[in-house]
Image: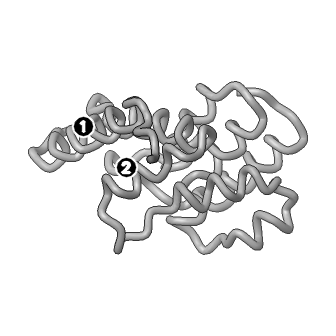
């Protein structure tokens, strides 16, 4: 992870937004976006990774992030990463391919979410979710279909 004034601001926002949440194994949820951000290379990627679940899973709004100084590039990627439950999952994943930033962060997010070693006990639901995430990674890594 790289540390700049902007990534430090995103880190603080991420921590504040997720500090009281737990993941499926009871660990502090904030470790997940921290882990995803660790694999990013650019300032925009780190900020997007840190904030990738903030809009979807907390009361934080895109206006809050804009007021905090997050750049348009990050805000646009975050909007794409915010899954509208009315949109079928693989359709949502396919739309991410239009943004290199959103796609990069989502692949890292999916890889971490598909890591079943994070769980103390693995259920069939966990295996099915991991398989869904592997399918999504395949979609993101497949070549784009040219538009006619």
Position of the N terminus, as image quadrant, is: top right
Instruction: Find residue 80 and name its label.
Output: none
**Picture coordinates of residue 120 (x, y %)?**
24, 37
Name the secondary structure under disc 2.
loop
Which of these two is toward me, 4 or 118? 4
**Picture coordinates of residue 108 (x, y %)?**
49, 33
Q: Residue furthest left?
A: 124
Q: Quadrant of residue 2?
A: top right
**Residue 122 visible in rendering:** yes
- Colour scheme used in the picture? one colour
Residue visible at 20% across and 38% down?
Answer: 131
Which of these two is toward me, 40 or 142? 142
Left or right: residue 11 compared with residue 89? right
Left or right: residue 28 compared with residue 118? right
Q: CA distance from mark 2 to mark 1?
A: 9 Å
Q: Residue furthest front?
A: 148
**Picture coordinates of residue 6 (x, y %)?**
85, 44
**Residue 112 visible in rendering:** no
Residue visible at 41% across and 30% down?
Answer: 143
Which of these two is toward me, 42 or 139? 139
Instruction: Find residue 120 and name its label.
Output: 1
Residue visible at 44% across and 54% down?
Answer: 22
**Picture coordinates of residue 142 (x, y %)?**
37, 31
Name the secondary structure under disc 1.
loop
User: Counting other residues with Cα less than 10 Å from the Cα at mark 1, is it few (<14), some (14-19), or many (20 or more)?
Assistant: few
Would you name the residue on which mark 2 appears?
A: 26
Left or right: residue 111 compared with residue 124? right
* CB under 8 Å between discs 2 and 1: yes
Q: Quadrant of residue 89?
A: bottom left
For marks 2 and 1 on the same chain, the one whose residue lies earlier in the sequence: 2
User: Counting other residues with Cα less than 10 Å from the Cα at mark 2, is it few (<14), some (14-19), or many (20 or more)?
Assistant: few
């Amino acid at each position: 992870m790289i540390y700049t004034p902007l990534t430090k601001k995103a880190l603080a926002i991420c921590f504040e937004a997720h500090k009281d949440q737990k993941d499926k194994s009871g660990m502090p949820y904030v470790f997940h976006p921290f882990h995803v951000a660790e694999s990013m290379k650019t300032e925009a990627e780190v900020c997007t990774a840190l904030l990738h679940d903030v809009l979807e899973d907390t009361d934080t709004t895109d206006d809050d992030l804009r007021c905090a100084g997050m750049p348009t590039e990050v805000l646009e990627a975050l909007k794409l990463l915010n899954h509208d439950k009315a949109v079928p999952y693989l359709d949502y994943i396919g739309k991410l391919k239009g943004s290199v930033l959103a796609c990069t962060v989502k692949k890292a997010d999916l890889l971490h979410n598909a890591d079943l070693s994070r769980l103390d006990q693995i259920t069939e639901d966990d295996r099915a979710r991991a398989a869904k995430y592997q399918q999504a990674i395949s979609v993101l890594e497949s070549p784009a279909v040219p538009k006619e």
